[in-house]
Image: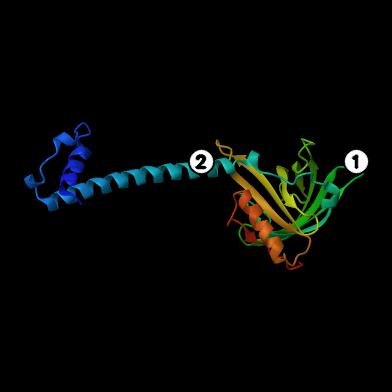
Amino acid sequence: MDDRWLAWAWWDGFHAKSTIHNLIPATEMSVHVLRMKVMFFFLHRMYCSRFVLLTMVIALVKDSLATSCVVDKFNVKNGFDQKRYAGKWYALAKKDPEGLFLDDNISAEYFVDDEGIMTASSKGRIKIFGFWVICADMAAQYNVPNPLEPGKMEMTYQGLASYLSSGGDQYWVIDTDYDNYAVTYACRRQKADGTCDDGYSIIFSRSPHGFPANIQRIVRQKQEEICLTGQFEPVLQSGE
């Protein structure tokens, strides 16, 4: 590397207004020290540039994730058909909400009457006080607020015993093929940015014995789309 160029680079790097006429003779300082200073200057500039770039990338990723996890932007099953959905389903995996929720042997059977109203009876086991395991039977009715989005329903449920709760939730069918799997979702409380602060999801199967590999891949993709990757736990189906 030309020593005179090094001297100019050092001077120009710290004095932007200098020109080639302001060259410092290389004999005025140690060439070794000069080279070290020039190297430090360029490394410093590279580090700062990379740090700024990394900061920008992180900010963009965070913004993208927040945008993609906005609940109202989640896609549901296009043209959801309640009649094809009717019948018995078994829960194979679940992501719990805050508070009490069914633990295992969860199943639901859906019915559609002549007026197109969908209802369901569901059951499962639940643990109360950390040790008392009881069977829970629930009944639910579903309403479609927007006919253009039949996969987004509102559910009203009642516990069929005095110690079981009653209330209402969303009931969104994120995806289903009607014959093998269904991915359902509900967000009970949203954050200020529109992402979910408290919600739950259940993966249903027509069989209590699990999915083939091709269906598992689809289900994992849907879990990712609703921002719940890695948050599910398996549901025991022992037939009890």
Residue 215 in sight from this viewpoint: yes
Q: Is residue 11 left or right of residue 187?
A: left
Q: Secondary structure at mark 1?
A: loop
Identify the image quadrant of residue 217: bottom right
How packed is label 1: few (under 14 Cα within 10 Å), some, or many (20 or more)? few
Q: Position of residue 149 (x, y in %)?
A: 76, 39
Name the residue at the right extreme: 114
Relative depth, front residue between 233 and 82: 82
Relative depth, front residue between 5 and 45: 5
Please tell me the numbered disc located at residue 100.
none
Name the residue at the left extreme: 28
Q: Position of residue 62 (x, y in %)?
A: 49, 44
Colour option used: rainbow
Q: Amino acid at mark 1?
A: Glu
Identify the image quadrant of residue 113: top right
Q: Is residue 88 left or right of residue 29?
A: right
Residue bearing the label numbered 2: 63
Residue 196 in sight from this viewpoint: no
Q: Is residue 49 left or right of residue 176?
A: left
Residue bearing the label numbered 1: 115
Q: From the image, state whether disc 1 or disc 2 is nearer to you.
A: 2
Eyeballing the image, is 150 above or below 160? Answer: above
